[in-house]
């Protein structure tokens, strides 16, 4: 049972007032400048950012670097891989073809891909669009990273996952799925008689004047392309190579904030498809049992502090992106970055909230509470879908930890309101019928957890090892061709990074055995009879994956 709407609204007012009182003296431009300069300093990878009102830009700037090696600053003209924002282009292309009578979203996918093994199930285009098909996502398969450098045709890519077992019955669940959008790209090709790239170019980019947008390529010369980066223990590195034939219709488009505004304006003005078609894309959808899910066709419905939003983000080797449209305020916000680090979703959400006059609070606005006032909310809270969050106290600081995840600080704005760093996620604590309750909100969406009798997970103890011991593990370990675990050491800390993934610190439980805190995983190093390190075994999800040291 949720808290009353008046209580929710009152808590929102408290959070907003505390932040707005410190920010109201600044203009929107000053607020955004200050925030983005801190998040994207001039000596690191950058961000291209745009805010538009009523279809026109009111803020458009770049911060940080488009190319670290050449010392080129980021500007709004820089072209960035938008990753999964591509999916909305694919979805709208499907709806364009539906309006042309060349397909229906209710069609079985075998109408266009007759040899696709559906295991006796009916899988529709609709279920590909809203991630309810049950088809295995190829990016979740263990061999995905081994293919990262390999150019593939759409049919070759489909062959990678088509014989995998289904994750669930079609329409029974929602599970974000890149394979579905690969199939949609191929269906566009069959129904239109054009390649996916040509269809998007001719029917969308050219029609809308999106002159800086294209189907991505690692070979073609792309004017103003921003280089992609990853973060490591020793600073930044060039992102790992990814053939853009692999993300295909799920994530291969490159664009700019200006072009994405043209795109958003076209959606709002029904330039490409009718309003009735667009409504199907933006208002979520339902499962077989009529349960509503917030994902429609290439776009998700959400809200920011009570204001409905339509949004989608993207992440790909070297780049992270986010786009948010708030229809009531007619505000569009787009953030494109050239690093697969940090959290552009949180950054864009915070700036969108500023733009509509509903800013999130900041931890600098936190108040001082006594230990007893903080300890009042210690406990385990059960939420929907068996999610358990633990609130714990340590050295004068309150923490929150979702079961199976990492512990994070929370900061009091009042005796009952606590925020996470960034301010877009918060708790509102209360008591009802003798039990504590915690309303957990994220970007304005909330759910209520009730106190249960469950002890928090015991944190593993880590050993302090000398730099001499740690340094013997430095090197690269090959899990499979193209999939390498790189071990590095800095300031007596040791880090692991899998190809195409962020870098994470690992912690010693024995001299040769390390664990991760961000996921349930363990690395055990192998040595020969002379004590030389020869490999490492990754233990994760019940699997044991050996990797030979290659350098």
Image (cartoon, helix red, strand yellow):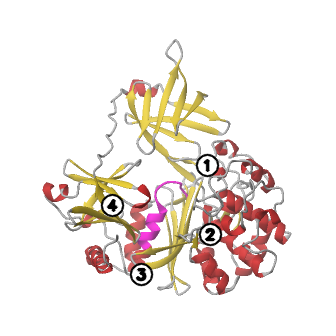
Instruction: Identify the mark at residue 420; answer none if there is no mark.
Output: 4
Q: Residues within 10 Å of mark 1 (few under 14, many from 20)?
A: few
Q: Quadrant of residue 9?
A: bottom left
Q: Which residue is mark 3?
A: 356
73 with respect to 416 (left or right): right
Query: Does residue 359 belong to the magenta stretch?
Result: no
Per the model, the C-alpha gap separating discs 3 and 2 is 24 Å
At a point 77% along the width and 53% down the height, the residue shown is: 117
Where, quadrant-wise, is the N terminus in this rendering? bottom left
Asked if residue 350 is among those painted magenta in the image, a careful observer would answer yes
- Say which residue appears at 37% left-offset and 54% top-offset: 388
The part of the chain drawn in magenta is 338-351
Q: Which residue lies under the disc numbered 2?
A: 298
SS for callout 3: loop
- The earlier-in-sequence mark between 4 and 1 is 1
How far apart are the alpha carbons under marks 4 and 2?
A: 29 Å
Q: Nearer the viewer, residue 205 or 440?
A: 440
Residue 13 location, x and y as percent? 28, 78
Q: Which mark is residue 417?
A: none
Q: Is residue 325 visible?
A: yes
Among the two numbered marks 4 and 2 on one chain, the one whose residue lies closer to the N terminus: 2
Could you tell me which residue is drawn at 59 percent across and 30 percent down? 547
Cα–Cα gap, marks 2 and 1:
19 Å
Residue lying furthest right in this view? 193
The secondary element bearing badge 4 is classed as: strand
User: Where 547 falls versus 323 (above or below)?
Assistant: above
Counting from the top left corner in percent of width and height, residue 63 is at: 48, 65
Residue 140: numbered disc: 1
């Amino acid at each position: 049972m949720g808290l009353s709407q008046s209580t929710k609204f009152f808590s929102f007012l408290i959070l907003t007032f505390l932040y707005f009182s410190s920010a109201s003296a600044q203009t929107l431009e000053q607020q955004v400048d200050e925030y983005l300069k801190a998040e994207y300093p001039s000596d690191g990878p950058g961000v291209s950012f745009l805010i538009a009102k009523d279809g026109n830009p009111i803020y458009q700037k770049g911060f940080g670097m488009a190319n670290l090696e050449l010392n080129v600053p980021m500007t709004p003209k820089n072209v960035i891989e938008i990753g999964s924002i591509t999916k909305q282009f694919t979805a709208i292309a499907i709806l364009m073809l539906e309006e042309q009578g060349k397909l229906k979203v209710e069609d079985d996918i075998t109408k266009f891909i007759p040899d696709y093994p559906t295991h006796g199930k009916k899988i529709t285009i609709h279920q590909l669009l809203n991630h309810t098909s049950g088809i295995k996502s190829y990016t979740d398969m263990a061999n995905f990273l081994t293919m990262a450098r390999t150019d593939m045709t759409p049919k070759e890519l489909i062959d990678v996952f088509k014989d995998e077992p289904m994750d669930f019955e079609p329409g029974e669940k929602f599970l974000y799925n890149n394979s579905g959008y690969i199939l949609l790209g191929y269906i566009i090709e069959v129904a239109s008689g054009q390649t996916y790239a040509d269809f998007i170019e001719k029917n969308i980019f050219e029609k809308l004047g999106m002159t800086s947008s294209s189907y991505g390529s690692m070979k073609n010369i792309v004017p103003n392309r921003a280089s992609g980066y990853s973060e490591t223990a020793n600073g930044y590195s060039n992102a790992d190579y990814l053939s853009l034939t692999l993300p295909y219709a799920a994530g291969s488009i490159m664009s700019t904030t200006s072009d994405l505004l043209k795109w958003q304006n076209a959606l709002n003005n029904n330039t490409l498809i009718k309003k009735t078609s667009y409504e199907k894309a933006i208002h979520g959808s339902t499962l077989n049992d009529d349960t509503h899910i917030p994902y429609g066709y290439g776009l998700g419905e959400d809200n920011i502090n009570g204001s409905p939003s339509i949004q989608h983000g993207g992440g790909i080797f070297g780049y992270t992106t986010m786009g948010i449209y708030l229809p009531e305020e007619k505000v569009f916000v787009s953030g494109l970055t050239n690093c697969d680090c940090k959290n552009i979703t949180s950054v864009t959400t915070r700036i969108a909230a500023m733009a509509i006059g509903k800013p999130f609070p900041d931890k600098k606005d936190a108040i001082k509470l006594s230990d007893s006032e903080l300890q009042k909310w210690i406990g385990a809270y059960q939420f929907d879908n068996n999610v358990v969050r633990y609130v714990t106290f340590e050295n004068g600081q309150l923490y929150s930890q979702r079961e199976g995840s990492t512990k994070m600080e929370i900061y009091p704005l009042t005796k009952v309101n606590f925020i996470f760093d960034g301010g877009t996620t918060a708790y509102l604590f209360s008591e009802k019928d003798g039990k504590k309750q915690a309303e957990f909100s994220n970007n304005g969406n909330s759910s209520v957890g009730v106190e249960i009798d469950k002890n928090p997970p015991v944190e593993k103890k880590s050993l302090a090892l000398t730099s001499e011991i740690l340094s013997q593990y430095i090197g690269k370990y090959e899990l499979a061709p193209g999939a390498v675990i790189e071990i590095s050491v800095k300031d007596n800390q040791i880090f692991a990074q899998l190809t195409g993934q962020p870098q994470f610190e690992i912690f010693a439980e024995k001299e040769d055995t390390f664990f991760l805190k961000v996921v349930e995983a363990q690395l055990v190093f192998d040595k020969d009879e002379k004590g030389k390190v020869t490999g490492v075994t990754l233990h994760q999800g019940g699997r044991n994956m050996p990797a030979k040291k290659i350098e």
